[in-house]
Each structure stands twice: as C-alpha cells, then as structure tokens.
Image (cartoon, helix red, strand yellow):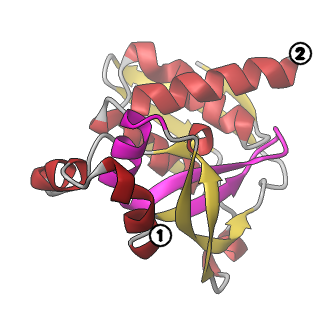
Amino acid sequence: MIQDSLALRLQKIIERCSRDRRLYGAVVKTLMYTVEFEDKLAKRSKRQGNAALNRILSGPWDNDLNELEEVRAIPVNEFLSYLQRNSPLLVAFETVLGELLYVVDRGCAKIAIARERGMKKVPVEVYSPPYRIPRGGDFSVKRIDSNWVSIVGGTPPEVVLPVKREETDVILSLLELRGLKTSAR
C-alpha cells in the first residue's frame, strides 16, 4: 500500500515538473542532494536503452525555446528513428519502488513531444550506473518563507531551494522515494 501511494505521488511529481521549469530545477537539485559523496565521484559511462516515460522526470523544454517546435515538426512516422539517432541523455536514481527514476540531463523537448504523441517508451542514453539509494540518514525540510525551503542532512549539509509552500510535498515525496527519513518543520 505504501509503495502504491509513493508510485501515485511519483506520477504527480512527474506531471507537475513537466509543466513547471522552476519546480523541475528544485526537484533535480533535491535528487542530487541525496547522492552520497562516493557516488558523486564514481566514474560513469553511458549506455543505450529504452525507458518508460512514466519514470522520466523532465522539464517542459530545454534552454532553447525553439527546440520544442523543431522537435514537434518531425513527422510522427519518423519520430522514433529520430530518437534512436538523437537519444535524450538521462541520469538514473534508484528508488524504494524497486525501479529507476530518470532525470533528463539533455533532451527535455524530445521527452515532451514523445509524451504529446502518446509514446510509452523512448530510446535513451543513460549515465550508468544509477545513483544508489542513500545508506540512511535523517533529512529535515524547513520552510524559510512562502517561496523557499531548507533541506538539512545531505551532501552538502544544507541546501536552500526555491519551493513554494504548496510544493513542499513534492520534496518530501522525493526524499521518501530515495529511502530517506524526513521530518518537516
């Protein structure tokens, strides 16, 4: 039952981030904050594969706003082969759900258009190995004001993120998905 609740919360996070660039940035920083120091130093390679869109966290676009329209202009019948040749680059994080959560490092527009076109899986390039679930630790999330939260317990010891009051649940859900104990203050 707890895993069903987390899976549903994950879907809501993915949907919210696909519409809100600022929230996406805060979510990515939260995830990177849960990576242990030795994982950050580990040598990573890239591997080709396929990933389910319902496990890919992406913002609504990349830095170039024209890129979204360029990708949208690719004919539907050519889109899959385009993605195979020009795969989005993802970073993978282990979750307590037993599945990976992917974060787009490059190619948000490609993911956005794949969702728009109703695809379920897409060809991707992924940094490997995935960032492991942290080995414990207690994290606390403290509201600084209506637009900022402080998270204590990761690497570095504290990080301040632009998160609106109604989005604090997103940060708590992400920390729980990474297997961490949290408390909100």
Give x and y (percent) for residue 70. Answer: 16, 55
Magenta region, residue range: 91-118
- Quadrant in the picture for residue 104: bottom left
Q: Which residue is mark 1?
A: 84
Q: Measure how far apart labels 1 and 2 are at the Cα level.
A: 37 Å
| Most foreground residue, 183 or 163 | 163
Q: Give x and y (percent) for residue 173.
A: 64, 28
Whether 33 is drawn above or below 4: the answer is below
**Tags 1 and 2 in contact by the CB under 8 Å rule?**
no
Which residue sits at x=59%, y=52%? 102
Name the kind of residue labelled 1 in the image: Gln
Q: Mark number for residue 43? A: none
Does any portion of residue 156 appear in the rendered image?
no
The mark found on residue 1 in the picture is 2
Q: Which comes before the other along the chain, label 1 or label 2?
A: 2
Label 2 secondary element: loop
Furthest residue in direction left, as rendered: 66
SS at badge 1: helix
Q: Total label count? A: 2
Task: Please state the horizontal and vertical placement of residue 90, each as a whole percent of the image.
Answer: 52, 62
